[in-house]
Image (cartoon, rainbow, N blue to C red):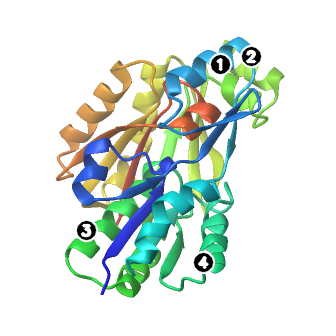
């Protein structure tokens, strides 16, 4: 009898330590620049993405996981007879989940379970860790899938964006709106709801005051959060932002574990540097 293997795509934004501790397999999405595709985190870093984006005044395209990666990383698990649980980025944002399903069908392998996280970044990561811990406790693949899917609606994922430039370059707001918004120091709060991203609130002022307003707006939901863990996930930029977010959460005294992780290529490409979010389960 094989093992239960937990697999996620690179947008889950878990730390290297978390991935290694729980034996999670990561499938990188693709970052496309100058017509060439690079594996997220493995062949391109967020710093390189920002450099390219600023030089070309556009954002890279992102693409689903490739069959080559699936063949290299999942086929050995299939040959071992393992139960594979893949938890992927929301199907409203990427075709990755469907690509993995197609791969399983092509291989005629019926022990690969695909979970649409209906989320992104460490909103996926929360679900991946839940699955990994259940597997470590001896749960079956079916039990893990049921537990993760029944809880996914309780994930709260949101971010506050420093600059509108990257959203405009990616077509998510107009260049005029970005110019005016940047001039007025407007910082939108992007939240995930029903698998889709949308603007939940807008803050005006410098990024520090906007972050303070954002965190205070989360207080009510944070009071109902599961206490096991919370994520502070951010794209590389101002190092003071995660320090302030972590201090805020520590002062709440609610969580057993505060996880600090970097956003990978997908969030970095679309939202830009100094984007920061607080992500957690509510009860």
Q: Can residue 123 be seen in this view?
A: yes
C-alpha span from label 1 to label 4: 38 Å
Q: In which quarter of the image is residue 118?
A: bottom right
Q: Which is more N-terminal, label 4 or label 1?
A: 1
Name the residue carrying label 3.
133
For the residue labelled by badge 3, is the local secondary structure a helix, a strand or a loop?
A: helix
Q: Distance between the residues labelled 3 and 2?
A: 43 Å
Callout 1: 10 Å neighbours few (<14), some, many (20+)? some
Label 4 to label 3, Cα distance in Å? 28 Å
Do the residues under discs 3 and 1 have CB atoms within 8 angstroms? no
* Residue neighbourhood size for the residue with mark 4, other residues' Cα within 10 Å, grouped as few (<14), some (14–19), many (≥20): few
Residue underneath mark 1: 52
Image point 55% across, 61% down: which residue? 70
- Precedes in sequence: disc 3 or disc 2: 2
Q: Do the residues labelled 1 and 2 touch (CB within 8 Å)?
A: yes
User: Which residue: 60% across, 55% down?
Assistant: 68
């Amino acid at each position: 009898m094989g093992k239960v293997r937990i697999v996620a795509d690179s947008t889950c934004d878990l730390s290297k330590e978390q991935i290694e501790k729980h034996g999670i397999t990561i499938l990188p999405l693709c970052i496309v620049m100058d017509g060439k595709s690079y594996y997220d985190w493995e062949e391109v870093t967020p710093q390189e993405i920002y450099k390219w984006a600023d030089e070309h005044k556009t954002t890279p395209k992102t693409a689903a996981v490739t069959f080559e990666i699936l063949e290299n990383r999942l086929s050995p698990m299939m040959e071992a007879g393992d139960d594979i649980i893949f938890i992927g980025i929301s199907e409203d944002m990427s075709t990755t989940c469907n690509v993995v399903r197609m791969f399983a069908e092509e291989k005629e392998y019926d022990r690969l379970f695909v979970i649409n996280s209906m989320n992104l970044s460490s909103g996926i990561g929360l679900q991946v860790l839940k699955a990994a811990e259940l597997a470590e406790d001896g749960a079956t693949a079916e039990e893990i899938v049921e537990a993760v899917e029944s809880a996914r609606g309780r994930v709260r994922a949101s971010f506050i964006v420093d600059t509108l430039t990257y959203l405009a370059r990616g077509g998510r707001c107009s260049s005029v709106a970005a110019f005016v918004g940047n001039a007025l120091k407007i910082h939108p709060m992007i939240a995930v709801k029903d698998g889709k991203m949308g603007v939940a609130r807008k803050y005006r002022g410098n990024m520090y005051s906007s972050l303070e307003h954002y965190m205070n707006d989360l207080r009510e939901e944070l009071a109902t959060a599961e206490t096991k863990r919370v994520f502070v996930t951010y794209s590389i930029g101002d190092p003071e932002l995660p320090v302030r977010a972590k201090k805020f959460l520590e002062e709440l005294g609610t969580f057993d574990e505060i996880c600090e992780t970097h956003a990978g290529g997908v969030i970095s490409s679309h939202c830009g540097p100094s984007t920061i979010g607080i992500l957690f389960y509510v009860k």
